[in-house]
Amino acid sequence: MELWTAFLIGFIGSFHCVGMCGPIALSLPYQDVTRVKTASNVLLYNFGRITTYALIGLIFGLIGKSIALAGVQQGLSITVGVLLLLAAFSIINLEKQLVKLPLLDILFQKVKHRLAILLNQKSNKRSTLFAVGFFNGFLPCGLVYMAIVGAISTGDIFSGSFYMTIFGIGTFPTMVSMAFVGNLISLNFRRNIQKVIPFMLFAFAVLFILRGLNLDIPYLSPMLIDSSSNEIPVCN
C-alpha cells in the first residue's frame, strides 16, 4: 500500500475525528510558563498518539506478513475490498460491528477508564500528557481501522508500523492547531468532511480489489507472490 494513502487518511480523517478526540485534547492542561514548554506539552500528547499507532502497525504488519506467507493475500485483499464497498454505501457499519466484539469491548472499556483517571489528575506532567495521548490512540475510530487495513496490506512488520506512523503524522496538523487556537472547526465543515469519507472508502475498496486480482498493473495491481507455489524462478 502506498504511503501517501496513510497520510491522506490521517489528514482528512482528523477533521472528522475532532468531534471525538477534540474534547480530550482541549481538556488537557497544555499551558505552561513559556510558549516553548506549552508547545512541548502539545507535542508530547500527540507523540503519545503516534506511538500507539506505530505499535498497532507493528502488530498488524506481523499479521499481514503471516497472511502473505500463508498464500491467502489475494483472497483477503478482495474480501477487505468488498467489506469497504459495503461500508462506503452504508450497507454495514464496520466501526459499530467491531466495537461489539467482546475482546475489543473489554479493551475499550479499560482504555476509557484509564483515560478518565489521567484526565481527572489535571496534571501537565510530561508523563501524564504522553500517557493520555498513548491511551487515546486505542479509542475506537473508523479511520484508524481503515489505516490498519493498509498496514496489514504492507505484508511486513516494520512497513506496517511505518504506515501507521505516517497516518498519525497526517492527523498532526489538525490536532496541534486545535490545541493552540481551540476548536474553530465548524460543525458544517465537519459535516462536509463526513461526506468525503464514503468516497475514500470506495476508492480504497477498488484499490484492494484490484490488488487482489493480480492484474500486473504497476502500483494499482502488482503481482502478489504466492508463497504456496512450488515454481522456482529460472534465470535465462
Image (tube, grey):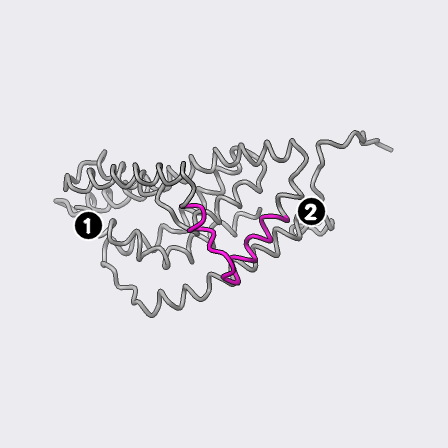
Q: Is residue 183 above or below residue 119?
A: below
Task: Characterize the local packing of mark 2: few (<14), some (14-19) or many (20 or more) Cα atoms within 10 angstroms.
Answer: some
List the residue tagged with mark 2. 222
Q: Position of residue 41 (x, y in %)?
A: 23, 43
Please indicate whether residue 216 sits to the left or right of residue 78 in the image.
Answer: right
Tag of residue 27: 1
Query: Which residue is farthest bottom?
Result: 188
Quarter of the image for residue 224 reads top right
**Mark 1 element type:** helix
Amino acid beneath label 2:
Pro
Q: Per the image, is 84 magenta? A: yes
Question: Magenta residues: mostly which secondary structure?
Answer: helix
Q: Position of residue 28 (x, y in %)?
A: 20, 47
Disc 1 + disc 2, Cβ < 8 Å: no
Magenta stretch?
A: 78-99
Q: Give coordinates of residue 235: x percent, y percent.
A: 84, 31
Is residue 211 depicted above or below 195 in this figure?
Answer: above
Q: Which of the two residues, 232 or 103, is positioned nearer the viewer here?
A: 103
Residue 36 appears left or right of 17:
left
The amino acid marked with disc number 1 is: Ser
Q: Which residue is located at x 66 percent, y 38 percent?
A: 72
| x and y percentages locating residue 5 in the rendered image | 52, 52
